[in-house]
Image (spheres, helix red, strand yellow):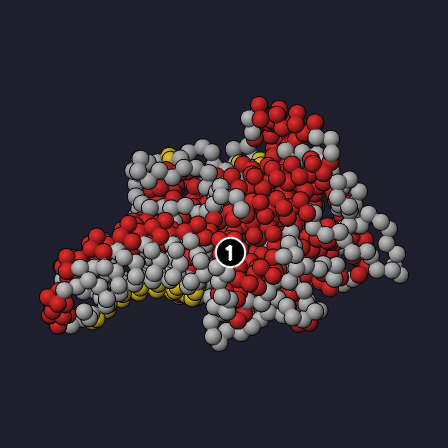
Amino acid sequence: MAVGPCSIALQERRVQLVESWSQNVTHLQELLYQVGALTEEDLSLVRGGGRLGVRDCMRNLLDVLHGRGEEACRAFFHVLQSQRANKESESTGEAIPPEGSGPSSIGSGPTNMQEYLRKHKGVLGRQHSPIDYLSIRTGRCISSESGDEPGSFTDITLSRCVGYTVPLQYHQHEAAMVGDAFRSQDQVCTFQDVYQRLLSVPGEDVTLLSGVAGSGKTTVVRRLVHEWARDSESQKIVLSLSFRELNLLSEPQTLHKLLLVHYSHLKPVLARVIDSQPGRILLILDGLDEFRFPLDFERSPKCSDPERTLGMGEMVVNLIKGHLLPGISILVTSRPHAISKVPTLLVTQLYSVLGFSKDQQRHYFEQSCSSPLVASAVWGYVSSYQPLQLMCRIPAFCWIVSTALRDGATCCLSQVTTTTLPSTARTTQAGSSDTSTTNNSHVKPITITAIYCCFLKSILVFHGEGRSQEGCSPQRLQEAPRVLQEMRPTLRDLGALAFKGLLERRFLFDQADLSSFSLDCSELSKTFLVEILREDRASLTYQRSFHFLHTSVQEFLAALYYVLQALSGSDPFSGLKSAVGVALFPVALHKVLTSTANKLLRPRRLLRRYVKKAFSWGGHHQSGHMDLFCRFVSGLLVPQTRVILDGLFRGRSQILPSPSSSSLSLSSPPPPPPPTPPFLLSLLHSQLQCGRLSPERQVNVCHCLYEAQDPGLAERLQGWLQVLAQQQVPDQSGPAKRDWSELAFLLQLIPDLQDLNLEAQGLDADGLRRLLPVLPLFSTLRLGQNPLGPEGAVVLACAVQSPDCRVERLWVVGTGLGCEGLKVLTEGLKDNHTVVDLRMAINHIGDVGAGCLADLLRTNHTLKDIRLRDNQITDKGLELLMEALTENTTLEHLWMFDNKLSKEGVRKLKEFARSTSHLDIKVCI
């Protein structure tokens, strides 16, 4: 390691430094930790367990700094210089080498604002350098480029939302929203657009950045800060606070103190910047969805004094409302379900992080895989399976897939055979490419559960302690059963912690949570848990909190625990008793369940009961946060999926045959694993027919059927593809037997489909209700000649009122809406800003319905084309429409053929049409 001038100066002045600065060693450690010159391990080494005096601690500090190299030594001298400027006592006389100079250079150091701000940029630039998930543990970055190169950040697709509406309620798991986002009519934008908006355009505003877990919100923030630090032209001053860190501050404090604790290197100038140049400040508040304090924008007391002590919730409210630090710009990041915490009137702009496009996915795999050949193989697997490619929109999931497949992918996946999803490429828009490879026998799509099994296996076998990532070989896989068997107790405890958190909707855990499940900071725990450290300066201790790598990893480990317990005949809830007691559910209910379980002596009946209980929990949580857990449970109950985790399940199940219970000869191929348990398919099919489940949960049951490898699912989906292509004549004897939830599941897998054509397919109101999760996502809904009736109009009104509605053309010809149904539909359209074409001929709306349309036209300025052929409208209804059209200047086409108009009514209508040049009216007697 090369020795620089600051390292030499540190050694030459060692005695002077120990004599002069030992009394300040604790404060020096704090400052050096803040700027990233010291790590937590360094602090522990310097303090020596609290048994050393200040002079010995100072000597240890100098040794650590010298060992860390020139950059750490330079940071130390900068810290000393800033402290000397504030000391009232005489200087000890040592020269502080400025950055880039040798030890003989005598200078005043950063004595003006620009010097401090340049230093601030350097500190934040280092703290926000490019990293990936695995590099946190292995110390390497997936990119071969330097971390300082802008190319180290993989591009992520974003959108600027046109109009900011807050969803009233989310009923789907976030994973189900990912593909939907790419159908959005919002304006797609680049990272540079966001950068220019936040860091180049002056002005006071609040910007929201929304995205599902793992979509890249924090990556966008890291890149934003990193490129700002490299931009010498930017006049902005970026300050960043994490809601996770604010959660750890239980005592009220002042905003000024909070900022000084986080940015102690700005202490001499921070107050001046806040008072005189607030317009230059961009404050980033990252992770609103994780904030544990309530935000009460109505009743929180107004505060404009940064020196006044406030609770964390009140402080955030006053910052966003502009009372504290008026004039600054604020960027708040959040998952979708939490953005409604901020009132819409306070938000200037909303951006959504959509994740990876197909090209960005391919580019990511090229970066993360060891060779183009491996990258091509991984991309082949991903692009052959629509659910997998859809979830790879999420960058974090892309990393999981890459980790699962790139290390001996052929060896891991050669054991997996699954039901093939029918090709959906022919249903997409003309000109789109067909990426399906399902006709190739050597490329087999795999389930999401199989991917996570491969991920777990890859992490433990190829990336565990003492195992390098390079040189992965089949020999490693031969050791996998032994490794998994050794890790089984710890994996079970991790899964129990994950399951407990899932039941309580908790994603952040403390040390007590880990201790209650006998978990420590072992290598395995560190592999799946990310540790957050926060120093308590009063007691000189650290507060530790933990979260799983990604919420989907928590859900998978929870499902793994649940299935391990269920297969062994144990109640998964009883495994939590030592940690959470029976408070998770009423005591009386717990006694009943325990008594009943003891009476059920047949293990298979116990297994059915536990599995049914899991799906019952998932169905009762309408928010959808248990959806992915239920899919993983379904997948892990399939023996041929459990083959991947051979060793973890060996000998555990006395209920179902183990996929690897017999010894295998190297010369003979292993026997095929048993099929999916019939009771699982029966249970899922019965849930699909259950009228109590919401449409979103019914779609998730279809996902569960796919994970369970239902052999009949592919054939049924193929039939639905023929329906979408209008190639199948409806069976008059059994349209009611169709399960429209399966179609909703299939439509989620075709993100490029814009036109939903279900004309004359026997679709009734109940079937339309099952399609509700996907109805708002299409630009055209062709639903004519179906018996929807007024109840169907209620469903359509919900669809057009959805904040995610992208419907431009709504065609409901001959659907029996009547005046009652039209009244409901027009109420929904009053708040809609997307529908421009409404075709509703032969619906018998009469004059009452015409009056409802007239009321709509007075307030709706989006509709451009309305077709009302054969709707029994008389001169009375016509008068109402013409009166409303005198106030509406946006409607361009109105068709009134075959209604009950008199000759006089037709004459008046034609005269009215001639007087309104913007409106084309078609009518005949």
Q: Quadrant of residue 397?
A: bottom right
Q: Give residue 558's position: percent from left, percent from top.
A: 63, 42
**SS label for mark 1:** loop
x and y percentages locating residue 417 in the rendered image: 71, 60
Image height check: is 661 above or below 584? below
Residue 911, x across and y down, in percent: 11, 70
User: Viewed as shown, does residue 920 lie left or right of 727?
Assistant: left
Which one is nearer the viewer's eye here, 754 or 532? 754
Amino acid found under the numbered disc labelled 1? Gly
Residue picked out by circle 1? 734
Query: Few, some or many C-alpha atoms within 10 Å of disc 1 (few <14, some 14-19, many ≥20)?
Result: few
Residue sitting nearer the eye, 407 or 96: 407
Tell me residue 590's x, y (percent): 60, 26
Mark yes or no: residue 795 visible.
Answer: yes
Foreground pick, 550 / 748 = 748
Could one spot residue 371 in this view of the protein? no
